[in-house]
Amino acid sequence: MDLVKLQRQWVDYRASLYKEGFLDEQFTQLQELQDENNPDFVVEVVSLFFEDSERLLNELTTALEQQSIDFKRVDAHVHQLKGSSSSIGAQRVQTSCIAFRNYCEEQNVEGCLTCLQQVRLEYSLVKTKLEYMFQLEQQILSAGGSSPM
């Protein structure tokens, strides 16, 4: 595929992530911090988000499987996940965490389990979409283009 088509595809794909609510302006601000001195900044920050999120999701799963659920601990994990998703602009993950925290406050096990599934789904979707966007960016760079941002 030629460079112009790849760049157009990247621009359109990125726009769709905002339109569908996967990303918000915080992601734009993150991209604006990237420059030629740190060309992998966004990928590095998002990769840390992926690692942290997977650890938190596993801890949440374990915490909600306990006979006696420590809702304060569950809420602390959800709060951390909400904060990290907010910091990279993963809007739908962040929104799911807000509902999750409400169920923690109510100590509603079923609500928490449902929200955990929703957060996992939203996380999985945004991870797949961001990985694809980074692959497109790599193709642009490999074709001799510059980073789209």
Image (spheres, helix red, strand yellow):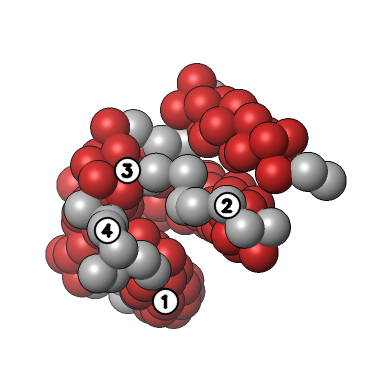
Identity of the residue drawn at 64% across and 31% down: 8
Mark 4 or 2, which is nearer the eye?
2
Q: Which residue is mark 1?
A: 51
In what element is the residue under mark 4?
A: loop
Q: Position of residue 11 (x, y in %)?
A: 55, 32
In this rendered view, identify the residue nearer to me: 63 or 149: 149
Identity of the residue drawn at 21% across and 53% down: 33
Identity of the residue drawn at 41% across and 36% down: 23
Type of the residue with mark 3: Phe
Q: Which residue is mark 3?
A: 27
Q: Which residue is mark 2?
A: 145
Label number found at residue 35 = 4
Residue closest to the far top: 19
Q: Position of residue 20 (x, y in %)?
A: 53, 25
Mark 4 or 3, which is nearer the eye?
4
Q: Position of residue 6 (x, y in %)?
A: 69, 41
Q: First in sequence: mark 1 or mark 4? A: 4
Type of the residue with mark 1: Glu
| Marks 1 and 2 in Cβ contact (< 8 Å) | no
In this rendered view, identify the residue nearer to me: 49 or 15: 15
Label number found at residue 106 = none
